[in-house]
Protein backbone atom coordinates (compact mmCIF):
# COMPACT_ATOMS: atom_id res chain seq x y z
CA UNK A 1 0.00 0.00 0.00
CA UNK A 2 2.83 2.40 0.90
CA UNK A 3 4.61 1.78 -2.45
CA UNK A 4 1.40 2.47 -4.33
CA UNK A 5 0.88 5.78 -2.48
CA UNK A 6 4.45 6.86 -3.22
CA UNK A 7 4.06 5.95 -6.91
CA UNK A 8 0.81 7.90 -7.23
CA UNK A 9 2.33 10.91 -5.45
CA UNK A 10 5.35 10.82 -7.77
CA UNK A 11 3.14 10.66 -10.85
CA UNK A 12 1.08 13.57 -9.50
CA UNK A 13 4.24 15.68 -9.02
CA UNK A 14 5.56 14.78 -12.47
CA UNK A 15 2.25 15.68 -14.11
CA UNK A 16 1.44 18.78 -12.03
CA UNK A 17 5.03 20.08 -11.88
CA UNK A 18 5.35 21.16 -15.54
CA UNK A 19 1.83 22.62 -15.50
CA UNK A 20 2.71 24.71 -12.45
CA UNK A 21 5.85 25.91 -14.20
CA UNK A 22 3.82 26.94 -17.24
CA UNK A 23 1.44 28.95 -15.10
CA UNK A 24 4.04 30.67 -12.91
CA UNK A 25 6.88 31.22 -15.40
CA UNK A 26 7.37 34.85 -16.43
CA UNK A 27 6.35 35.71 -19.98
CA UNK A 28 9.29 35.50 -22.39
CA UNK A 29 7.45 37.52 -25.02
CA UNK A 30 5.23 40.56 -24.66
CA UNK A 31 2.35 40.98 -27.06
CA UNK A 32 0.56 44.31 -27.44
CA UNK A 33 -2.75 44.84 -29.25
CA UNK A 34 -4.76 47.96 -30.06
CA UNK A 35 -8.19 47.91 -31.61
CA UNK A 36 -10.91 50.28 -32.66
CA UNK A 37 -13.47 51.27 -35.27
CA UNK A 38 -12.54 51.75 -38.92
CA UNK A 39 -14.80 52.48 -41.89
CA UNK A 40 -17.84 50.59 -40.61
CA UNK A 41 -15.64 47.72 -39.41
CA UNK A 42 -12.88 47.24 -36.88
CA UNK A 43 -9.09 47.32 -36.87
CA UNK A 44 -6.46 45.59 -34.77
CA UNK A 45 -2.79 46.51 -34.56
CA UNK A 46 -0.82 43.66 -33.02
CA UNK A 47 2.88 43.77 -32.11
CA UNK A 48 4.43 40.45 -30.99
CA UNK A 49 8.05 39.93 -29.90
CA UNK A 50 9.76 37.35 -32.09
CA UNK A 51 13.42 36.27 -31.67
CA UNK A 52 15.07 39.69 -31.30
CA UNK A 53 12.47 41.45 -33.43
CA UNK A 54 8.77 42.00 -33.83
CA UNK A 55 5.92 40.66 -35.91
CA UNK A 56 3.62 43.56 -36.71
CA UNK A 57 0.10 42.80 -37.96
CA UNK A 58 -2.62 45.16 -39.09
CA UNK A 59 -6.06 43.63 -39.57
CA UNK A 60 -9.14 45.38 -40.85
CA UNK A 61 -12.26 43.30 -40.26
CA UNK A 62 -15.83 43.68 -41.54
CA UNK A 63 -15.12 46.63 -43.83
CA UNK A 64 -17.11 46.70 -47.08
CA UNK A 65 -16.08 43.79 -49.33
CA UNK A 66 -14.30 44.93 -52.49
CA UNK A 67 -13.20 48.27 -51.04
CA UNK A 68 -9.56 49.29 -51.51
CA UNK A 69 -7.43 50.41 -48.58
CA UNK A 70 -3.96 52.01 -48.45
CA UNK A 71 -2.22 50.72 -45.32
CA UNK A 72 1.01 52.32 -44.12
CA UNK A 73 2.98 50.81 -41.22
CA UNK A 74 5.88 52.59 -39.49
CA UNK A 75 8.51 51.44 -37.00
CA UNK A 76 10.17 54.31 -35.10
CA UNK A 77 9.06 56.66 -37.89
CA UNK A 78 10.52 54.55 -40.71
CA UNK A 79 8.00 53.20 -43.22
CA UNK A 80 8.09 49.39 -43.26
CA UNK A 81 4.97 48.87 -45.38
CA UNK A 82 2.88 50.91 -47.80
CA UNK A 83 0.40 48.76 -49.68
CA UNK A 84 -3.01 48.98 -51.30
CA UNK A 85 -5.18 45.95 -50.56
CA UNK A 86 -8.71 45.03 -51.55
CA UNK A 87 -11.03 43.76 -48.83
CA UNK A 88 -11.99 40.14 -49.42
CA UNK A 89 -15.55 38.72 -49.45
CA UNK A 90 -15.65 38.79 -45.65
CA UNK A 91 -14.43 42.40 -45.59
CA UNK A 92 -10.95 41.55 -44.28
CA UNK A 93 -7.64 43.24 -45.09
CA UNK A 94 -4.40 41.91 -43.56
CA UNK A 95 -0.86 43.30 -43.61
CA UNK A 96 2.04 41.65 -41.76
CA UNK A 97 5.71 42.55 -41.44
CA UNK A 98 8.62 41.25 -39.37
CA UNK A 99 11.26 43.77 -38.26
CA UNK A 100 14.41 43.66 -36.14
CA UNK A 101 14.29 45.21 -32.73
CA UNK A 102 16.33 48.27 -31.79
CA UNK A 103 17.71 49.33 -28.39
CA UNK A 104 15.26 51.10 -26.10
CA UNK A 105 11.55 51.59 -26.53
CA UNK A 106 10.05 51.15 -29.98
CA UNK A 107 7.01 52.74 -31.57
CA UNK A 108 4.80 51.11 -34.19
CA UNK A 109 2.13 53.11 -36.01
CA UNK A 110 -0.30 52.34 -38.78
CA UNK A 111 -2.74 54.31 -40.85
CA UNK A 112 -5.39 52.85 -43.13
CA UNK A 113 -7.26 55.01 -45.63
CA UNK A 114 -10.05 53.85 -47.88
CA UNK A 115 -8.96 54.76 -51.41
CA UNK A 116 -10.99 57.60 -52.93
CA UNK A 117 -12.63 58.65 -49.65
CA UNK A 118 -11.80 60.45 -46.42
CA UNK A 119 -12.45 57.35 -44.34
CA UNK A 120 -9.32 56.60 -42.32
CA UNK A 121 -8.13 55.12 -39.05
CA UNK A 122 -4.89 54.42 -37.27
CA UNK A 123 -3.22 53.46 -34.02
CA UNK A 124 0.12 53.60 -32.25
CA UNK A 125 1.81 51.06 -29.95
CA UNK A 126 4.99 51.65 -27.95
CA UNK A 127 6.87 48.71 -26.44
CA UNK A 128 9.74 48.94 -23.98
Image (cartoon, rainbow, N blue to C red):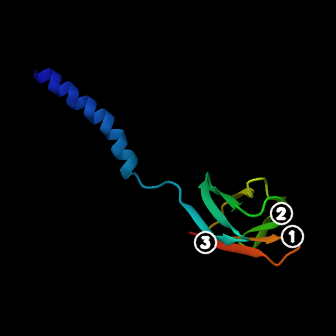
Residue position marked by numbered label 2 in the rendering: 67
- Residue 105 falls left or right of residue 38: left
- Residue 15 falls left or right of residue 58: left
Which mark's residue is nearer the viewer, 2 or 1? 2
Q: CA distance from mark 3 to mark 1?
A: 27 Å
Q: Name which of mark 2 and mark 1 comes first in the sequence.
A: 2
Disc number placed over residue 115 in the picture, else none: 1
Q: Name which of mark 2 and mark 3 comes first in the sequence.
A: 2
Residue drawn at point x = 36 percent, y = 52 percent: 24
- Residue 124 falls left or right of residue 1: right
Please identify the quadrant where the N terminus is shown.
Answer: top left
Q: CA distance from mark 2 to mark 3?
A: 30 Å
Please identify the quadrant where the C terminus is shown.
Answer: bottom right
Q: Are marks 2 and 1 in contact (CB under 8 Å)?
A: yes
Q: Please determine whether, in this image, residue 1 is positioned above or below residue 69.
A: above
Q: Name which of mark 3 and mark 1 comes first in the sequence.
A: 1
Residue drawn at point x = 82 percent, y = 78 percent: 118
Residue drawn at point x = 89 percent, y = 73 percent: 116
Q: Is residue 24 visible?
A: yes
Q: Nearer the viewer, residue 81 or 33?
A: 33
Q: Secondary structure at mark 3?
A: strand
Quarter of the view holding residue 100: bottom right
Q: Please determine whether, in this image, residue 109 is positioned above or below residue 49.
A: below
Q: Please determine whether, in this image, residue 4 is positioned above or below residue 82.
A: above
Q: Nearer the viewer, residue 128 or 126?
A: 126
Quarter of the view holding residue 58: bottom right
Q: Position of residue 88 (x, y in %)?
A: 79, 54
Q: Secondary structure at mark 2?
A: loop
Q: Position of residue 34 (x, y in %)?
A: 60, 68
User: Label 1 neighbourhood size at 10 Å, few (<14), some (14-19), many (20+)?
Assistant: some
Disc number placed over residue 126 in the picture, else none: 3
In this view, the residue farthest toward the right is 116
Amino acid sequence: MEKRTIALTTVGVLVAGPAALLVTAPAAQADVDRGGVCGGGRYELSVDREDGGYEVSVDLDRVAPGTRWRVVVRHDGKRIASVVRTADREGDVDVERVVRGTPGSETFRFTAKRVGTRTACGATVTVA
